[in-house]
Amino acid sequence: MARSINEIQESILEGINSDTELNALEVLTNNEKDSLTSNSKVSIWRLFVFIISVSFWTIEKLFDTLKLEIEELLYLLKPHKPSWYRKKVLDFQFGHELNEKDVYDNDGLTVKQIEDAKVVKYAAVVEINSILYVKVAGENNTVRTKLTDTQEAALTQYIKLIRDAGVKVVVINRDADLLQLEIDAYYNPLEIDASGARLDGSDNEPLQNKLRQYLKEFEFNGELVLTKLTDQLQQVQGIEMPVIKEAFYKFGNQEDWTPINETYQSDAGHMKIKEENLTINWIPRDVTL
């Protein structure tokens, strides 16, 4: 990046002050010495420093321009990685036109207008058998949601325009995968009652809320690990030993539930659990006398 003219001048002046040979002006008359060594901003030698600084600044700006042109050529020639596709999908602006360089012209738009147009709030790209599967989700009141059909159609067209030639891309835009759990919750009777509510009245569903929070904040397209989920549930005050007895999932139009042994990579990229799919067996943890 080009230095400013002032930065270049300061560099030259620092070099002059630190080099004793530049002060050897014996060949000059006293009047000439006074003129050349004056500290005035309009002295002859300072004008020379300014002219040289501008020259260096111009050269450095030209090199910056050359660098940008080379980077653009490399950008056009180099095949892109999945991470590039993810970024481009997150940059998608619903209802906006792309220019010839496949980027948006946002002149005249506010930051809020641009952010509102970016309907894809979550994205992940997975390559399987030379096909890029792009998982996407929107957001409504901090809850991950499926994009509308119109938004999905526009996004698909956008990807066709920006993708590398020959690359096959499949958009996955689905409702959250459903999770089903049966949990044995061993609780402390001094803190929680037989229905799972806190005795101090601060939370009627502390364990359920922790589970919902975990799924809400779960990394998009992350891997569900039952052991890690158990660790999270054990952080609930008053829950001494949560044991996940059974776990199942289903997605899309599937009717049957599939058991989860230990890990599960969600198909839609996000998961949710309905109240009817959560069974908690509340078991008091007796104090050993």
Image (cartoon, helix red, strand yellow):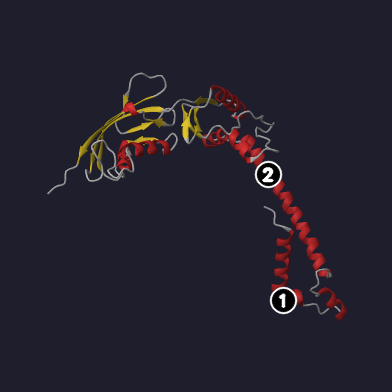
> x and y percent of residue 74 in the render?
63, 39
Please tell me which of labels 1 and 2 falls first in the chain. Answer: 1
> Which residue is more in the foreground, 167 or 7?
7
Seen at 78% across and 61% down, the residue is 52
Q: Mark 2 sits on what residue?
A: 68
In the picture shown, does residue 76 fall above or below 3? Answer: above
Q: Amino acid at mark 2?
A: Leu
> x and y percent of residue 136 in the render?
50, 30
Residue 226 seen in this snapshot: yes
> Which residue is more in the foreground, 114 or 48?
114
Between marks 1 and 2 in the image, the one whose residue lies nearer the viewer: 2
> x and y percent of residue 242 in the render?
26, 39
> Which residue is more in the foreground, 90 or 109?
109
> Does 9 sit left or right of 116 as displayed?
right
Number of dots carrying numbers: 2
Disc 1 to disc 2, how far (Cα)? 40 Å
Q: Residues within 10 Å of mark 1 (few under 14, many from 20)?
A: few
Mark 2 residue element = helix
Q: Mark 1 sits on what residue?
A: 20
